[in-house]
Image: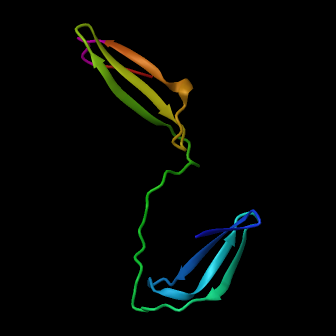
Amino acid sequence: MATSNAGVVEYRAALVRSDGTLLNRVATYNPMNGSVVVVVYTITVSDPSVHLIRETTASISTTKVYENVELLYTDTNASALNITYREFSPDGLARVAFFQNLTYESGTKSLTFK
C-alpha cells in the first residue's frame, strides 16, 4: 500500500515469515531516502493458520549483453516472401533504428539474414 504525506510516498507492507505465516508487524519503506522502518505498528492476525504461498516469476536480466529479436511473417505473394525484422533492448524497448522489412524471392529454399 502506498501513502502520501506532504508529497513523500511511503510504502507499507505486512511482514511474512519464511513459513508463509503473517508476522504481527507492519514495515514501511521510503524510496526517497531509502529508509526502512521495520516496526511501524503491530497488527492482530485474526486467523494465524493462514499461510501465504510464494510465487516465483521469471524476469529478463538486463545486465547481460544480448538482443531480443522478432521475425514477423507479413505477406507472401506470387513473387516474394515478406518478413519484418525487429530488435529490442534487454529492457524490452523497441529499437526503431533496428527495424527492417525483408523481401525474399518466393522460390528460395533457404533464407539468410544478418
Residue at position x 40%, y 84% from top?
Answer: 51
Residue at position x 65%, y 69% from top?
Answer: 3
Count of marks, rendered view: 0
Residue at position x 52%, y 26% from top?
Answer: 98
> Which residue occupies the foreground of this view, 28 or 104?
28
The segment highlighted magenta reads: 105-110
User: By what rule are the colours in the image chosen?
Assistant: rainbow
> Which residue occupies the foreground of this view, 89 or 5?
5
Residue 7 in the figure: left or right of residue 72: right
Residue 1 sits above or below residue 50 on the image: above
Residue 84 sits above or below residue 93 on the image: above
Residue 109 sits above or below residue 70 on the image: above
Percent across and percent down for residue 28 are: 66, 76
Quadrant of residue 6 within the rendered picture: bottom right
Quadrant of residue 49 within the rendered picture: bottom left
Residue 80 in the figure: left or right of residue 7: left
Percent across and percent down for residue 20 are: 44, 82
Residue 106 in the figure: left or right of residue 46: left
Quarter of the C terminus within the rendering: top left
Quarter of the N terminus within the rendering: bottom right
> Which residue occupies the foreground of this view, 82 or 7?
7
Percent across and percent down for residue 39 are: 66, 85
Residue at position x 56%, y 48% from top?
Answer: 62
Percent across and percent down for residue 87 are: 49, 31
- Is 26 part of what is drawn in magenta? no
Q: Main secondary structure of the magenta part?
A: loop
